[in-house]
């Protein structure tokens, strides 16, 4: 260790602001000691949330130190502060707790975001059983979840075909078919909303949507021009 790590004062109950999620994220920590020496140490974060996480490394900075963390997968960097240590029942050091100076939902990568989304969906599924919900909002939510489910399946298929040394681009027609299905569904819903006078010329984004529909119509017209009589 570069410096002895002192245990921090007792933490204030309720200080942790969001749930931590257990998974491994490869990181690199860089910090400067009081004598000016620069340390760079690779390690892994094993429990994280948007505010920080628990780091395991061979060499640790002292509590109170400011460090620069780099996610070795995304190469995104963030500054953090060492706020404490964690030991097991025998007193063996398990890691240091760090707090990101600027909380981030993206720094730890997509794995963290997916785990957090899963936990949020489980809680939402429970809450939905007892809460009154507008049917239109519920329908939009179901459609969005279905779209995400199919996208996740396509991504998994892509990765598995790459692992088997098969052509992953064979997944693309499936993604295109899903986009067409979703676009058709959304257009039908927008047509229903227009008929019910739920939108006006002042509706946010209506001009951009109209232009997008015109571009799509032109592309489809070119695609089907051979079928015209």
Image (tube, rainbow, N blue to C red):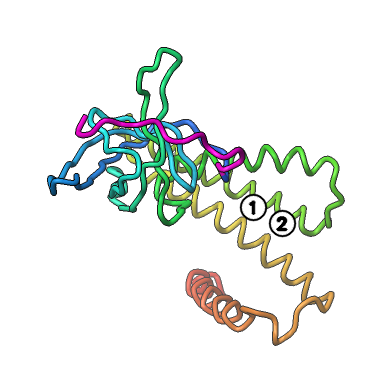
Q: Which element is circle 2 on?
A: helix
User: Can residue 160 be seen?
Assistant: no
Disc 2 packing (10 Å; few <14; some 14–19; many ≥20): few
- Please name the predominant secondary structure of the magenta segment in the image: loop
* In-front residue for pair 224/208: 208
On screen, 218 above or below 176?
A: below
Residue at numbered disc 2: 140
Q: Is residue 214 left or right of residue 106?
A: right
Q: Is residue 30 above or below residue 191?
A: above
Q: Residue at x 43, y 57 (%)?
A: 102
Q: For mark 1, what is the residue?
A: 144
**Residue 208, horizontal then vertical, whole percent:** 57, 80
Say which mark, if any, is on residue 156. Answer: none
Task: Report helix, strand or loop for mark 1.
Answer: helix
Are dots 2 and 1 in contact, CB under 8 Å?
yes
Q: From the top left corner, tell me how far across and down residue 179 is, in percent.
A: 55, 57
Disc 2 and disc 1: Cα gap in Å? Answer: 6 Å
Q: Which residues are magenta?
A: 1-16
Question: Is residue 61 or residue 107 the one in the foreground?
Answer: 61
In this rendering, the count of numbered labels is 2
Residue 10 appears left or right of 138: left
Check disc 1: other Cα within 10 Å, few if <14, some if 14-19, many if 20+: few
């Amino acid at each position: 260790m570069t410096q002895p790590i002192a245990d921090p004062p007792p933490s204030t109950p309720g200080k942790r602001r969001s749930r931590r999620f257990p998974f491994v994220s490869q990181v690199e920590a860089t910090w400067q000691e009081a004598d000016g020496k620069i340390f760079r140490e690779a390690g892994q974060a094993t429990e994280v949330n948007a505010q920080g996480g628990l780091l395991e490394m061979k060499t640790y900075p002292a509590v109170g130190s400011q460090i620069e963390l780099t996610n070795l997968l995304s190469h995104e960097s963030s500054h953090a502060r060492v706020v404490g240590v964690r030991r097991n029942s025998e007193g063996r050091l398990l890691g240091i707790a760090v707090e990101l100076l600027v909380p981030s939902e993206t720094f730890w990568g997509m794995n963290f975001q997916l785990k957090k989304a899963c936990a949020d969906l489980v809680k939402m599924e429970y809450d939905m059983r007892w809460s009154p919900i507008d049917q239109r909002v519920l329908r939009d939510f179901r459609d969005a979840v279905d779209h995400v489910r199919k996208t996740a399946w396509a991504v998994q298929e892509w990765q598995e075909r790459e692992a088997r040394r098969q052509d992953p681009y064979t997944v693309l027609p499936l993604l295109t078919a899903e986009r067409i299905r979703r676009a058709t569904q959304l257009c039908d819903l927008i047509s229903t909303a227009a008929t019910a006078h739920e939108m006006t010329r002042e509706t946010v984004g209506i001009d951009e949507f109209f232009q997008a529909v015109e571009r799509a119509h032109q592309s489809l017209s070119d695609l089907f021009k051979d079928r015209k009589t």
